[in-house]
């Protein structure tokens, strides 16, 4: 469909700015920023892409992976969402429920991200409310980019 989002949702562990992936046998595989950079270069690097071309949104549902998020943004992904500290499952559920609900209703990435932050700040749990300060939307600086 026209304007449909192409989303890569990674639910994983993050350790020392590395993505920890698990295969079907339960074996952990470490994906460093350098490895991720190499994979992203295979898709054509950071050149501008059309709205219908490739992944438009990466959601890093993992702890402390800001450096990995930066790699995705530098690799040409227009929208990257993640958390810069340890992420509790309950916090993740509040954030993702609101984010995806907004996206499915046609919101822009920026509006959906903002709604998810409001949901965190409105939660009954103090730990969840405090976590709102640690979620990010990359690339930073040009909010007009996230209005699609």
Image (cartoon, helix red, strand yellow):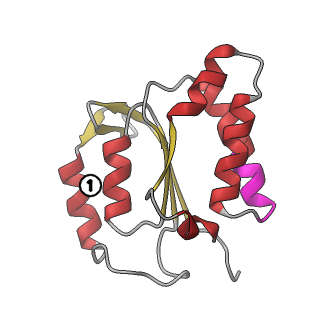
Residue 60 is one of the magenta-drawn residues: no
- The residue that appears at 64% across and 50% down in the rendered structure is 113
Q: Quadrant of residue 140?
A: bottom left
Tell me: 114 left or right of 39: right
Task: Give the residue furthest to the right.
Answer: 105
Q: Position of residue 54 (x, y in %)?
A: 47, 74
Q: Position of residue 51 (x, y in %)?
A: 55, 81
Task: Give the residue furthest to the front.
Answer: 141
Q: Quadrant of residue 128?
A: top right
- The residue that appears at 76% across and 54% down in the rendered structure is 102
Q: Is residue 81 above or below residue 75?
A: above
Tell me: 106 left or right of 34: right
Q: Is residue 125 above or below residue 36?
A: above
Closer-to-camera residue (63/112): 112
Task: Give the labeled residue for mark 1.
Answer: 36
What span is colored magenta in the figure?
99-106
């Amino acid at each position: 469909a026209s304007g449909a989002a192409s989303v890569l949702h990674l639910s994983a562990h993050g350790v020392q700015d590395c993505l920890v992936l698990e295969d079907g046998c339960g074996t952990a595989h470490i994906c460093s920023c350098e490895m991720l950079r190499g994979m992203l270069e295979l898709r054509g690097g950071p050149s501008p892409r059309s709205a219908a071309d490739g992944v438009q949104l990466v959601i890093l549902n993992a702890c402390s992976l800001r450096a990995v998020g930066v790699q995705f943004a530098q690799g040409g992904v227009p929208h990257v969402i993640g958390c810069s500290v340890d992420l509790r499952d309950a916090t993740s559920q509040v954030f993702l429920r609101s984010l995806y609900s907004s996206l499915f209703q046609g919101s822009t990435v920026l509006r959906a991200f903002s709604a998810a932050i409001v949901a965190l700040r409105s939660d009954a749990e103090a730990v969840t409310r405090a976590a709102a300060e640690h979620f990010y939307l990359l690339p930073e600086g040009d909010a007009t980019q996230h209005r699609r």
